[in-house]
Amino acid sequence: MPSQEVLNWLRTRFFPHIWCPGCGHGIIMHALLRALVDLGKKKEETVIASGIGCSSRMPGYIDACTLHTTHGRSLAFATGVKLANPELTVIDVMGDGDCTAIGGNHFIHACRRNIDITAIVMNNNIYGMTGGQASPTTPVGAYATTAPYGVLDVPFDICKLAAGAGASYVARATVAHPLLIEKYVRNAVSKKGFAVVEVVTHCHTQFGRKNKRPRPIDNINFFKDNSVMNNKASNMTLEELQGKIVIGEFVNIELPEYIEQYKNLIEEVGGNRG
Amino acid sequence: MAKFVVDVNEKWCKGCGLCVAICPKKVLEFNERVKSEPVRIDDCIGCHQCENICPDFAITVKEAKPNA
């Protein structure tokens, strides 16, 4: 909006924020705050954790209980917070490098554990803050400072990774669809279990200027033209899907949640402490 | 009489141009300080696309209060 409810969630003394003009992270933060306001969450019962990177500046701007942790390990911190006080709503915001490279192990094991945390992965295909190095999600053939002749490695599909590792909610949206991000974040936060929302965003400063998308609006138009909803994508061939971004909800299932299992175990074997 | 009010917080606007490009009715344009400014407010249909796409929380779209 920002409506007054959304502005109440901001630490306005730090504004304007440090992100580049037109950066998608601001669009994601706005959608996240709208979702939290919509769900009627309270600031003192909401924890936002993050690691290191541009995306991880987000908790600095959100006026909730926020936690800025070490590179890639934010899920470990978030797991600790959630286990210590299961009443809290815990949201972990990560970048693509933070999530799949440095914190790759933490990510897959958090998915497997299925603890009630929402992970929002902001995938901008590059390490933006440190100077534009190729990340595990840089597409094949794209240029980066560490790949001046194009990347050879096949990128991760974060949604498939999360689904394969056992997350109970997996969805993907792009910053060209802010209301879709809001909807998926709302679903993910309401979900009992580990929920992953991958938001495809852009880094026009580091990725865009090397890959013919130097302005923010070039990226937004690229996402609009190249994203396909998953129900439509299921009828398309692999050749047709080449270079497309498949968006939508991929997994939405009920699985045993870790904290409940943990409580059950304590009741079962904890003995009589009366 | 414009039905909507588009407020731009110039202190937060960085002039990225997303709102100018996204508006389906071309309501917004850059002013001389390269900040977004509603120049054709009568055309605004209140779709909130500029507000939702603004990464800097700088735009607010409100319904105009009818003159009493």
Image: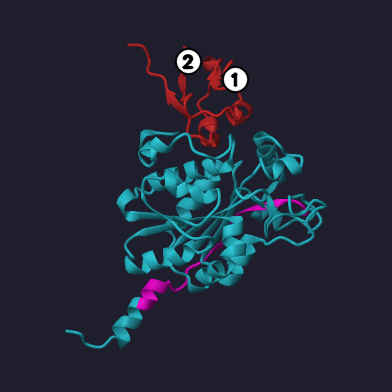
Quadrant where the image shows the N terminus of chain A: top left
Query: Can you see residue A35?
Result: no
Chain cyan in the figure, letter? A
Residue A84 horizontal/vertical position (percent) = 33, 68
Relative to A218, residue A82 above or below: below
Residue A247 horizontal/vertical position (percent) = 63, 52
Label 1 – label 2 distance at C-alpha: 17 Å
The mark found on residue B2 in the picture is 2
Chain to which mark 2 belongs: B
Q: Quadrant of residue A220?
A: top right
The mark found on residue A258 in the picture is none
Name the amino acid type tagged 2.
Answer: Ala
**Direction from residue A99 to residue A211 in the image, left or right:** right
Query: Can you see residue A74?
Result: yes
The type of colouring in the image is by chain
Quadrant where the image shows the C terminus of chain A: bottom left
Residue that badge 1 annotates: B29
Q: Secondary structure at mark 2?
A: loop
Relative to A170, residue A56 above or below: above
Q: Which residues are magenta?
A: A242-262
Q: Quadrant of residue A137?
A: bottom right
Q: Tell us which disc is closer to us: 1 or 2.
A: 1
